[in-house]
Image: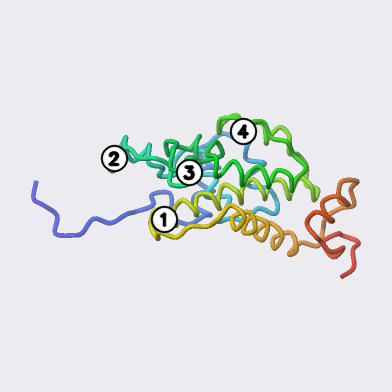
Amino acid sequence: MKPSLVNDKVVWLPSSDGQFSIKSAWDEWRTHGSRVVWAKILWFKFHIPRISTVVWFAIHNRLNTLDRLVVFGTSNPSICCLCGVGPEDRNHLFFKCPFSYRVWNVMQDMCNLIVPYLDWIDLVDWLTRTIKGKYLAATISKLVFTCSVYCIWTERNCRIFKGSKSTEVAMQAKIRSLVRNRILSISSFKEEVTNAWFMVKWSLPNSILKSGQG
Ligand SMILES: [Zn+2]
């Protein structure tokens, strides 16, 4: 075989133009995957596409954590850059790592949830069974989960590739900001008994409610 004179090119097969897009990833999953229960905490009505996509990759264990890169022979065994102690794999990173656990713990309080200390798969299963509905409480809880995974993954990437570090408090503030800004863009939440607690906790205006006024 003669060597190719054309440079190798990365092609995203599910898309007709070979370019990755969130829509094509979603279509690929919807076409070939079975309808799984965890879809409800990922692709809910007010999800943030770029953030849910990262969690989708985490659920399929396709994020390039160091344990996977070692298997592929592209990395040496390494420890988690968030705590400097544990192994960098999905279970540890989300949320058994002491750093990410402390972030996650505070964010649970913001949802009035007490989440058991579980491995990733069991955690996703528990959240799927526990957080139900389209009300404000469920929407905030789903956003907190997805945004927490996203922020921990981006923090990990910043530390490895940019050498920059955020504190736990800064991480919590970033997650709160992502969630709150998304909620503030909505004006159709129905009246529900748990709304009052969440509206105080997140300093939300009545304008997010269907019948609310600025
Ligand atoms: Zn760690």
The location of residue 61, given as percent across then percent down, is 46, 38
Mark in front: 1 vs 2: 2
Q: Earlier in the sequence, mark 1 or mark 3?
A: 1
Cα distance between the residues tagged 3 and 4:
21 Å
| N-term-proximal mark, 4 vs 2 | 2
Q: Is the C-beta of the residue carrying label 3 under 8 Å from the nearest atom of ligand 1?
A: yes
Tell me the kind of residue under disc 3.
Cys
- Amino acid, disc 4: Leu
* Label 3 sits on residue: 83
Hey, which quadrant is residue 204 in on the image?
A: bottom right
Tell me if the residue at label 4 has its CB under 8 Å from ligand 1. Answer: no
Label 2 crowd bin: few (<14), some (14–19), many (20+), radius 10 Å: few
* Vertical relation: 139 (above or below) 33: below
**Callout 1 touching callout 4 (CB < 8 Å):** no
Q: Residue 123: which disc?
A: 4
Observer-side mark, 3 or 4, equals 3
Q: Is residue 70 left or right of residue 55?
A: left
> Which residue is depicted at the point 90% across and 68% down?
213
Within 10 Å of the Cα at label 4, are there few (<14), some (14-19), or many (20+) other Cα atoms?
Answer: some
Q: CA distance from mark 1 to mark 4?
A: 35 Å
Residue 188 or 31: which is nearer the viewer? 188
Give the structural element (helix, strand or loop) at label 2. loop
Residue under pointer 1: 16
| Residue drawn at the location 26% of the way across and 38% of the way down | 73
User: Looking at the picture, which amino acid does disc 1 mark?
Assistant: Ser
Query: What residue is drawn where x is 40% and y is 60%?
Result: 162
- Residue labelled with disc 2: 76
Q: Residue furthest left?
A: 2
Whichever of callouts 3 and 4 sits on the residue coming sooner in the sequence is 3
Q: Earlier in the sequence, mark 2 or mark 3?
A: 2
Instruction: Tell me the element at label 3.
Output: loop
- Badge 3: how crowded within 10 Å, few (<14), some, or many (20+)? some
